[in-house]
Image (cartoon, grey):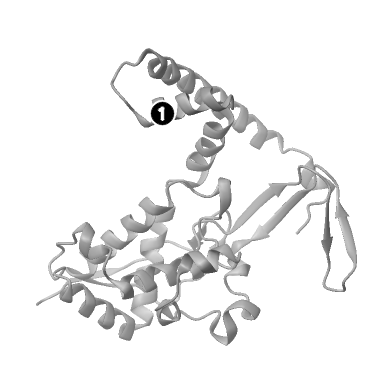
Amino acid sequence: MVAGKPFREPDRVEQDIRDDLDAAMKTLLSRNLQDADSGSGGSSLLQRLAAQSRSSQQPLTEDVLSQARQIFSLGHDPSALALFWAILALNRHPEVLQKLRRELCSKGCGRGDASYGALRSMPYLDAVVTELFRLHPPISTTARRVTHPIAVETRDHDTVVLPRGTQLFSSVYLLHRDRQVWGETADDFVPERWLGVNADSVRNRGEYLPFLAGPRACPSSGFVLLQVKTMLAVLLSRADIDIPNDVERVIGGVIRPNKPVGYEVREVTV
């Protein structure tokens, strides 16, 4: 989608929040960069980034501010929401839940003892989480600004030139449910579609982008995936959680349930 004039005019409230956030982040960044330069506190990731920034003569500030804005606006909900949507999907597909529990037990996670090695050796858990983020990506839409004029071809094979400064929007949610990409089961929860498939290869084709891709991809995607796998492994080995089936999605910056959701928890007996 290409934004029109109304989208290019900054919203005053949003701009004020952004300015305040940037000012706070710059203060914190300046303070931490001074600590990094002084070498206090031993070696740290920030010190290494600062050294790399100096050697490449590229400013560190804007990259850090960009990631800080993302974390502030969207970084606190995805894991909790992913767990909710996972529980709902497993409620609706008990055969998937049974298969996943069998794999967890076979790897020694029968009572929540989910080791890092075990989590990395469960292909069906990988498939369940990958399919979960296909249907419920952490962010529903992303935007980019054209930095130099580019020519694109339309479906009618016409050529359109997008001028510098054009704002582009892409719906990750719609991409992940596109029947031209995913077939007739595009809207269905089918973890088996990922067995024997490398998710990175699908992402490289631009078809699977739960954490986006390239230099602006989510820097904590690996942590989020491991976190969700750990939560599922521990939770499913200890409890059954029933959620009503009448939950609907509200699609905004993140995908949320349309109302507060009640639930019932029962201990799993082995």
Image vertical order of residue 195 relative to residue 63, above or below: below
Check disc 1: other Cα within 10 Å, few if <14, some if 14-19, many if 20+: few
Image quadrant occupied by the C terminus: bottom left
Horizontal side of residue 236 vs 155, given as left or right: left
Instruction: Return the residue nearer the eye: 111 or 181.
Output: 181
Q: Residue at x 29, y 20 (%)?
A: 41
Q: Position of residue 182 (x, y in %)?
A: 57, 79
- Residue 100 screen position, x and y as percent: 27, 77
Tally of marks? 1
Please report the residue visible at 53 percent of the width from the left and 69 percent of the height from the top.
202
The residue most toward the front is: 55
The answer to which image quadrant residue 225 occupies is bottom left
The outermost residue toward the top is: 38
Residue type at mark 1? Answer: Arg
Front-most of residues 15 and 63: 63
Q: Position of residue 106 (x, y in %)?
A: 16, 76
In this rendering, the answer to whether 49 lies above or below 75 is above
Identify the residue shown where x is 76% and y is 42%: 147
Q: 202 left or right of 125?
A: right
Q: Which residue is mark 1?
A: 48
- Provide the secondary structure element on which disc 1 rests: helix
- Looking at this view, is 37 or 169 the one in front? 37
Quadrant of residue 2 within the rendered picture: bottom right
